[in-house]
Structure formats: C-alpha cells, structure tokens
Image: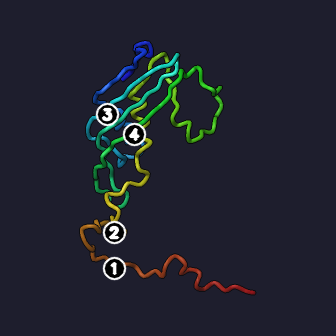
Amino acid sequence: MKVKVEDISPRGLSLDYLEEVGELNSTLTRSDPLAAQLPDRLRVTCTLSKVRRLVRLSGALQGTIEHACARCLRRFQIPLELAFQLSLQPADEGPHDGHAVELAPDDFEFGTYRDDEVDITAMVCEQVMLVLPYRALCREGCRGLCPTCGADLNEGACGCVAPQTGGKFVSLRGLKVNR
C-alpha cells in the first residue's frame, strides 16, 4: 500500500488492513527455497503523522511465519506480533551523498520515501525480514536428521551404527613433536 504524503492530515492518518504476502514470499524464497514464508495475509495497523516533510510511521503487524527447522527440515509455524516505529524523510534530503555509510543501531528507526509517497508495503517487508530467526528450530530439543540415512531422529532411533572415527583429532595421534 502506498500513501501520498499530502494525504496525511494534520491529525494523522490511521490504517488497518490486510497486506498481501505474495511479493514478500517470493523475496524470501529467491535465494533459499526452504526459507520462511507467510502462509496468510498480514494484519497491518499503523498511524502516519507528519511534521513538514518528516513522516512518522507507528505500526503493528500480526500474522504467522512458516519456517523449515534448521535441524530436521520439518515445517512449523511461528506467531508474528511486532510493533515498529520509523521516521521517514524524503530520499533526496538524506545525509548521504551516495557514498557507503556505516549504520549505528539507532539508524534502523529511520528510513526514506520517494516521490512524495510512503510505500508501507516495503516497510512491512523490511520489518518482517528483520525479525526472522537466523536459525529456526521447531523446538529447542530437536534432534535433527541422521547424517547417515537421513531419518528424523525426533521420531526415534534409526538403527544406523555410528562410525568409530576417534574424533576429529585422530589424525594427530601419529604426530611426534621434537623438543
């Protein structure tokens, strides 16, 4: 959803709608087909206010994220409830002149808009991507897959005999150190 800055009244503008997730899902799975996906639309509630050309966006997202477990690859769902606040300024008024800039933690509360339009969909996508877990687990004690046969160890032992390699330092047994 895009909102023209001129449509934001002095009292602000409140929105409550369901955001389509097709574009976000294609972005998430572009590099990793097992990546998180959103099975349903997201509920977005937000308020926009402005002071001159600075736009303040306060909002909340509600929905569900579906992830593949990093250990057993089983798909599971995580509830998504997120509140966010952003201060947006026109892209052409930013402090950056095209050169790379190192961001501080507080810089993540700032953003830009172009052509006198605030792209709320882009802000929603950004916020969802920021809260995705780096390594999602279906549960803390997930045992994962057997490295030999690929059986799900959460359903029980697979019967494979673990190879007796002696560990990763076995090749150092024959090393002689002269002093």
Q: Nearer the viewer, residue 41 or 106?
A: 106
Residue 140 screen position, x and y as percent: 35, 62
Residue 81 screen position, x and y as percent: 33, 42
Q: Nearer the viewer, residue 71 or 107?
A: 107
Q: Find out whether the residues at labels 4 and 3 contact each other: C-beta distance under 8 Å.
A: no
Q: Residue furthest top?
A: 6
Q: Find out whether the residues at labels 3 and 2 contact each other: C-beta distance under 8 Å.
A: no
N-term mark: 1 or 4: 4
Characterize the local packing of mark 4: few (<14), some (14-19) or many (20 or more) Cα atoms within 10 angstroms: some
Q: Assign a secondary structure to mark 2.
A: loop
> Which mark is nearer the camera, 3 or 1?
3
In the image, is 3 to the left or to the right of 158? right
N-term mark: 2 or 1: 2
**Residue beneath label 3, please?**
22
Q: Find out whether the residues at labels 3 and 1 contact each other: C-beta distance under 8 Å.
A: no
Residue 38 appears in which quarter of the rendering? top left
> Which mark is nearer the camera, 3 or 2?
3
**Residue beneath label 4, please?**
128
Characterize the local packing of mark 2: few (<14), some (14-19) or many (20 or more) Cα atoms within 10 angstroms: some
Q: Nearer the viewer, residue 117 or 169?
A: 117
Residue 23 appears in which quarter of the rendering? top left
Q: Assign a secondary structure to mark 1.
A: loop
Placement of 6 over or under 64, stated as above or below: above
* CA separation in Å, label 4 and label 3: 13 Å
Residue positioned 34% across, 56% down in the render:
69
**Residue beneath label 2, please?**
146
* CA separation in Å, label 1 and label 4: 42 Å
Placement of 164 over or under 125, stated as above or below: below
Q: Find out whether the residues at labels 1 and 4 contact each other: C-beta distance under 8 Å.
A: no
User: What's the residue type where badge 1 is placed?
Assistant: Val
**Residue beneath label 1, please?**
161
